[in-house]
Amino acid sequence: MKFGLRNVSYVYPNGTGDIWADTKAHIQRAERDGFDSFWVMDHFYQLPSHGSEHEPFLDAWTVLPALAAVTSQIRIGAMVSPVAYRNPALLARMASSLDHISNGRMNFGFGGGGYKPEYKSYGYEFIDKGSTRLAQMKEALQLILGIWAETPFTFHGEYFHVENAILEPKPLQKPHPPILIGGVGPKVTMRIIAELGDACNLWGPPDEFTKQRETLKRHCDDVGRDESTIEKTTYDMVICAPTESQLQAKISQLLPKGIEPWMALVGTPSRLIDIVGEYQQVGADHLCMDFSGNDPESYQLFVDEVMSKFR
């Protein structure tokens, strides 16, 4: 089992107040503690589900190269970059540069996008029809894979095109950096994952993970793909406390609206060991998580008492 840390907030309870210094310290600690990957969200400002929209929030593709330069082993990536935010040929170029800066440690997270308010606030067109956004995502991935492989590269699609585009240097990782496709739509998204993805990001408790994995297997069978070649990641938020009474107090503090159905990793260390074991049994390869409110105690308990059991 691999473990990834998803940095959904740049507000750190024990931080210095210097956002870059604190973020650098956060990833360096994660690397020392044995996390396999570190992910940032590619949004323009904080999502209401994780904090105040007015809190500090660093740009994903600016901070990723900086994080690569201050680490040496942990893999890094965005979870995930919406197709509409950048020209895909330009993003392919940015990603190739990051792959070199990180010495081949980049995971390329990509998705169709869907948080309409930030599109409008930053002047981006939001396409309400989800199937169109997914079609754009698939076509952009085809372009990105092509420009990573060929020079010069020409592509004429319905939504994007390049003409004799030159991209040098190519990414370090061969045949290309691993592509994680975000989303769990059972008809279209899962099909695109089966066709083009190297990793997926499944949601929910182990029983829901199992249902989504079965859907992915069916699509892989349809396209002649070995499902085991796709890394199954999952995302969850961790709240941990030494005792049940302390846990309930922490839940009240960090989650005023209560636990949502998709949150599985809320419990004492012994309970979380059981849940991580369940994820492992149903085929999760890479457990990506954030710690609600960047809670230091939840982080330390998980590292010391839960992660250590699966190493």
Image (cartoon, rainbow, N blue to C red):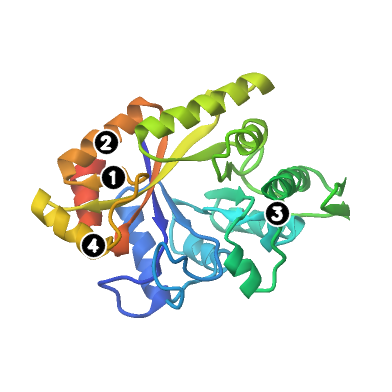
Check disc 3: other Cα within 10 Å, few if <14, some if 14-19, many if 20+: many
Residue depicted at x 61% and y 24%: 220
Element on which disc 4 rests: helix
Whether residues under marks 4 and 2 lie with C-beta atoms below 8 angstroms apart, the answer is: no
Amino acid on which the number 4 mark rests in the picture: Pro
Residue depicted at x 16% and y 54%: 247
Amino acid on which the number 1 mark rests in the picture: Leu
Residue 296, numbered circle:
4
Residue 311 visible? The answer is no
- CA gap, disc 4 and disc 2: 21 Å
Residue depicted at x 34% and y 80%: 17
Relative to 61, say whether 178 is above or below: above
Amino acid on which the number 3 mark rests in the picture: Ala
The residue beneath circle 3 is 92
Residue 275, numbered circle:
2
Using the image as rendered, state which of residue 222 and residue 18 is in the foreground: 222
Residue 265, numbered circle:
1
Q: Quadrant of the N terminus?
A: top left
Using the image as rendered, state which of residue 1 and residue 131 is in the foreground: 131
Element on which disc 1 rests: loop
Residue depicted at x 57% and y 68%: 62
Tag in front: 2 or 3: 2
Check disc 1: other Cα within 10 Å, few if <14, some if 14-19, many if 20+: many
